[in-house]
Image (spheres, grey):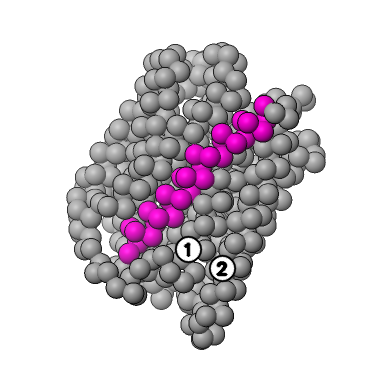
């Protein structure tokens, strides 16, 4: 790991911190302040969230078709993403918020797919694949940072100033990445010739994609409304902002730990553990509304969703090592589709039952279904293949 390699990794980490930790997830701790000051309903907040996820779906899908000028296209999307954060603080128009959240989502989809594929390919080409898990700590870093800064900035400059402040911080991260990447040239990708071996929708991959999509639908309900739910529980309001910091810290430490586990156990087995822990974390506030339960729920949410993201994308690249952009795009697109539906269902359930427990219970059931599909798909795929090749090696060096 030379200084240049480390700089490339840190730059990618900062880009994910902007696109995911700040642009997407800072909305979660800011939403309660916006709802109070602007008179937004839980349902209206769901529409704003879904606008972002519709954009994310479009961006993730489009990024799969980028083969040339990846670096320039990536940095342009980061610039637009930063602008969408900054201008959220300059308007009180609901429809402008919808547009800005869509732009943030679309550019975020491009940033996640391109950054992930660029970094995974770069590290593999330099025999540094074992470091790829650290890339996703950027998401947790961004979440923790936004969780710490949002209550502090809002105290002095209201929610409007919070968006502006986060926009300035994101711009600094972009400039830092440009400096760190100034000597790095990203090779254009070559289109892989279509054959039976290069079709990604075969074997275990469709099952992994479907399970990942259900995970996106289930986890995003907690990811969008966790702080708002805690904020509206009498006696726990003072813990709302801190819960998001706990989520970010858990997410920041998650990837290296999950990477260590797959060096000892099969990826699907470790993925199953992550799903089970997430289900427990989602359902915990349904049965217990105490400080320890909401903090544990926040920790498990951050720890598991990053684990599932890093494990799923890494495993997909193992299955199709020459098509990292295509497989990451496919996974991220179906993940984004689940995220579009999730907040809408959540708001409908909350409105109908007049309780936050209903959307959380729904989210838990959906992730249970995702886990079931993952295990069924693995079992069926193993039956079709000789035992010697059913599980790709989890040794990171095999990816280099």
Q: In which image quadrant can residue 103 be found?
A: top left
Percent x, y for residue 106?
A: 36, 38
Residue 227 found in image quarter: top right
- Camera-side residue: 323 or 117? 323
- The answer to whether 92 is drawn above or below residue 74 in the figure is above
Q: Residue 38's image quarter?
A: top right
Contact, CB < 8 Å: mark 1 with mark 2? Answer: yes
Q: Is residue 91 left or right of residue 287?
A: left
Q: Residue at x 51, y 42 (%)?
A: 339
Read off the magenta span.
323-351
Real-space Cα separation, disc 1 to disc 2, in angstroms: 8 Å
Q: Is residue 172 left or right of residue 32?
A: left
Residue ID for mark 1: 206
Reading the image, the residue beneath label 2 is 377
Question: Which mark, by number, is residue 13?
Answer: none
What is the quadrant of the C terminus in the image? bottom left
Whether residue 93 appears in this view of the structure is yes
Q: Secondary structure at mark 2?
A: helix
Percent x, y for residue 354?
A: 73, 26
């Amino acid at each position: 790991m030379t200084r240049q390699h480390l700089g490339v990794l840190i730059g990618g980490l900062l880009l994910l911190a902007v696109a995911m930790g700040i642009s997407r997830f800072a909305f979660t701790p800011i939403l309660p302040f916006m709802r109070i000051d602007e008179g937004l309903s839980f349902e209206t907040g769901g529409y704003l969230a879904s606008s972002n996820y519709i954009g994310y779906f479009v961006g993730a899908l489009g990024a799969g078709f980028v083969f040339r000028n990846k670096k320039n296209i990536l940095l342009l999307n980061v610039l637009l993403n930063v602008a969408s954060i900054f201008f959220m603080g300059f308007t009180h128009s609901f429809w402008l918020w919808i547009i800005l959240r869509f732009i943030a989502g679309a550019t975020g989809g491009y940033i996640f797919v391109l950054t992930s594929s660029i970094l995974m390919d770069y590290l593999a080409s330099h025999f540094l694949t074992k470091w790829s898990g650290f890339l996703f700590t950027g998401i947790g870093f961004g979440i923790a940072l936004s969780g710490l800064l949002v209550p502090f900035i809002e105290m002095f400059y209201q929610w409007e100033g919070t968006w502006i402040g986060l926009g300035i911080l994101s711009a600094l991260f972009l400039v830092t990445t440009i400096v760190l990447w100034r000597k790095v040239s990203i090779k254009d990708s070559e289109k892989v010739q279509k054959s039976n071996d290069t079709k990604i929708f075969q074997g275990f991959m469709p099952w992994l994609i479907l399970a990942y999509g259900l995970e996106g639908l289930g986890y995003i309900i907690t990811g969008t409304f966790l702080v708002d739910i805690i904020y509206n529980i009498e006696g726990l309001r003072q813990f709302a902002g801190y819960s998001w910091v706990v989520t970010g810290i858990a997410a920041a430490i998650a990837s290296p730990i999950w990477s260590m586990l797959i060096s000892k156990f099969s990826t699907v087995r470790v993925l199953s553990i992550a799903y089970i822990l997430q289900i427990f974390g989602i359902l915990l506030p349904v049965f217990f509304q105490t400080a320890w339960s909401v903090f544990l729920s926040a920790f498990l949410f951050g720890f598991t969703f990053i684990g599932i993201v890093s494990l799923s994308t890494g495993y997909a690249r193992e299955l199709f090592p020459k098509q990292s952009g295509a497989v990451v795009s496919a996974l991220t697109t179906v993940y984004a589709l689940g995220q579009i539906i999730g907040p809408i269902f959540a708001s409908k359930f909350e409105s109908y039952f007049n309780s936050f427990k209903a959307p959380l219970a729904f989210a838990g059931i959906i992730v249970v279904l995702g886990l079931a599909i993952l295990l069924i798909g693995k079992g069926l795929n193993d039956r079709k293949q000789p035992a010697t090749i059913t599980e790709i090696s989890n040794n990171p060096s095999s990816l280099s």
